[in-house]
Image (cartoon, grey):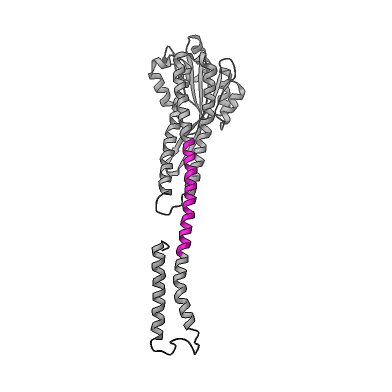
Amino acid sequence: MIIDCAVYRDAQRIEDPEHRTDVAAAHADAARNGGFLWIGLLEPDPSELDGIAKELGLHPLAVEDAVKAHQRPKIELYADDDFFIVVKTLWYVDHEDAVETGEIAVFLSPTYLVTVRHGEGGRLEDVRTRVEAQVDLLGHGPVAALHAVLDEVVDGYEDVAADLQVDVTEVEQSVFSPVRTHDSERIYGLKREALEVRRAVMPLRDQLARFLRQQSDDLGPNALPFFRDVADHLVRVGETVESLDHLLDNALTAHLAQLSVQQNEDMRKISAWGALLLAPTLVAGIYGMNFDHMPELHWAFGYPLALLLMVCVSLGLWRTFKSTGWL
């Protein structure tokens, strides 16, 4: 459905109820007076987007991608000044250690900007409000609106990376704590979520860098620094996610080493307790064979002596194992 549809001219929003119901009239008004049209859609059905595509002349392949969603982040040029941009939106569900994803498809030309949003993330109402309040920025046309959308999405990436960093720190502390932990499942889960962030950030980073190289003249010297700032944030998020992935690899290796050490300690303790039980069992077994000619067999203190021998041998073994750290 159409969330918002408005014409912008001279850095001002033109309020006209007809613009929301008649896209062709709104686009003609924007193009005729040097303004631009900004349409925001949320998970439109094919017929709804096809109607807008016919009015604006959107490329059918781009329209198909916008309807189906689940596309790889990309920036494609379909005509001299008509671009199709796909970006992933990310948000973090902390109690599940999960990165949820959505998608925004953007159609850009000198006279219009159409955003097609899928998923719960990447709400653009606040973005539109901020752009409308910045007259100097809005004066650059649909390119300024595109920058605002990209900036909002990349800020979301930074928030997700920060949340992931907190959870990775918690995992590191848990792995190296003296308490026996079971962190393998959480580490694998965080690596999966880090991979989800990489799938959103890395393709967009490369595509945006190429876009800035090829379209630097068209963007103009005033708009270019803003897009370079977005590209710089993307690079920073990408480096953060890569470092987090390496930290998780190291944490997993350390966790497996910790498990191996703990198992060795368990085996030493089992062996030590086995030796402690073996000594009295050996004495009892020998004196329980009931041969006639055994030392002190018919002596009145033979039984207490055997018990004392068991206790002394066990105590000696216990002190030895305790001093060596086996117990």
Quick one: which residue is furthest to the top in this view?
A: 33
Is residue 201 within the magenta segment? no
Residue under the image location 42 percent in, 45 percent down: 172
On the question of residue 153 being in view, the answer is no
234 or 246: nearer the eye?
Answer: 246
Residue 101 image point, x, y percent: 50, 35
219 or 173: nearer the eye?
Answer: 173
Specify the principal SS of the magenta part.
helix
Quick one: which residue is furthest to the right in this view?
A: 61
On the question of residue 60 being in view, the answer is yes
Residue under the image location 40 percent in, 68 percent down: 318
Q: Give the range drawn in magenta.
A: 242-269
Residue under the image location 41 percent in, 20 percent down: 131
Residue 143 image point, x, y percent: 48, 18
Residue 296 image point, x, y percent: 43, 87
Residue 74 image point, x, y percent: 55, 26
Residue under the image location 41 percent in, 77 percent down: 310
Please tell me in which quadrant of the rendered image residue 313 appears.
bottom left
